[in-house]
Amino acid sequence: MTRLPEKADRPTMYFVGVTTGSSSIMRVFPVWAKELGLDAVIKGIDMPIHAPAEEYRRVVEFIRDDPLSLGAMVTTHKIDMYNAASDLFDYLDPYAQRFGELSSISKKDGKLCAHAKDPISSGLALDSFVPKDHWIKTGAQACVLGAGGSALSISAYLGNEERHGADVPGRIHLDNRSAPRLAEAVRVLEYLNVPMSYHMCKEPVLNDKIVESLPAGSLVINATGLGKDRPGSPLTDACRFPENGIVWELNYRGSLEFLHQAEAQQESRSLTIEDGWTYFIHGWTQVIAEVFHIDITGDRLAACDRIAREMR
């Protein structure tokens, strides 16, 4: 059974994850709080992957009913928590409803609120390393390995023609081991006009085939969680990344096998490699801003980025 914290005796934000004590945020948050003028602490709530629904409800009810528990960041459990406890919230933002996930729990005007911040934070991260007009100039494609909340948010951002115009991938591939998750991805992303391909790949070698079929300059993303909370990679060591490709490992801590596979080919395949650190910064600052009802942009965001990088 998930162990809940004691009733908060000062303003508290929670981190709901799997191995929260290993996250850099536990060291970074107190320094960020001082920089942002927040009199608050952070506490971790560790839950097993795909915990029983009643466990997710207990966590949400605890935060809802404790006055000094102001909200939470939710990582690995975003979809499961939404499915189990969405009815407990007074407000679900449009992204949470569209993607069927929640990454932010907060309180406002007596209401318990849930937001899905991945579509925003993933977009901010992508814009930091994918060159402007990259897709128009190269005709490259994107392959998102995984079909969880982050994978769907990233796919939606990449394929957003209203935002990007013609500068979108020639095709977006979504690979996953589970047929139900792929079916859900089809439902959620059906509004996109960008060509989509959905692949059920139960073994890494099947992911290899998709990645190796991509044209030069394509983007390959590990959104499976493998290499963080669980060891491994969605690809085999034999897989060849696309020449001049961009490789994004969403994780920034853990065994990071996928990242190391890319690093082994960085020179020979002329790869641009990005880990999950920038995503980490944007993900956390977006949720902290929601929980404490403050603005974290401009100089404040730059200060948080600098502090976190110095402590990395």
Image: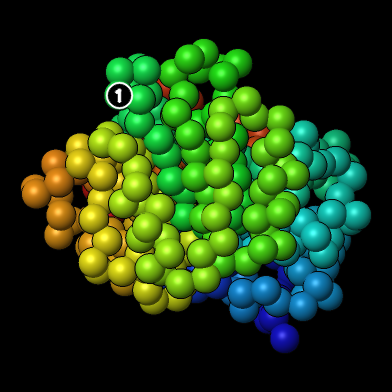
Is 109 in front, or is 282? 282
Residue 183, placed above or below residue 135: below
Three-letter amino acid code at the position of disc 1: Thr
- Judge from the rendering whether residue 267 lies leftward or rightward of residue 137; answer left or right: left
**Residue 261 picture location, percent across and down:** 23, 62
Q: Residue at x 75, y 49 (%)?
A: 100
Question: Which residue bears the numbered disc 1?
Answer: 138
Q: Residue furthest bottom?
A: 1
Residue 115, placed above or below residue 18: above
Classify mark 1: helix, strand or loop.
helix
Q: Is residue 276 visible?
A: no
Q: Residue furthest left?
A: 267
**Residue 64 picture location, percent across and down:** 83, 57
Q: Residue at x 38, y 68 (%)?
A: 205
Is 224 in front, or is 65? 224
When asked about the image quadrant of residue 42, the answer is bottom right
Is 178 in front, or is 296? 178
Near mark 1 (Cα within 10 A), the count class, few <14, some 14-19 or many ≥20, is some
**Residue 311 picture location, percent across and down:** 28, 53
Q: Is residue 136 visible?
A: yes
Q: Residue at x 34, y 43 (%)?
A: 214
**How many numbered circles are shown?**
1
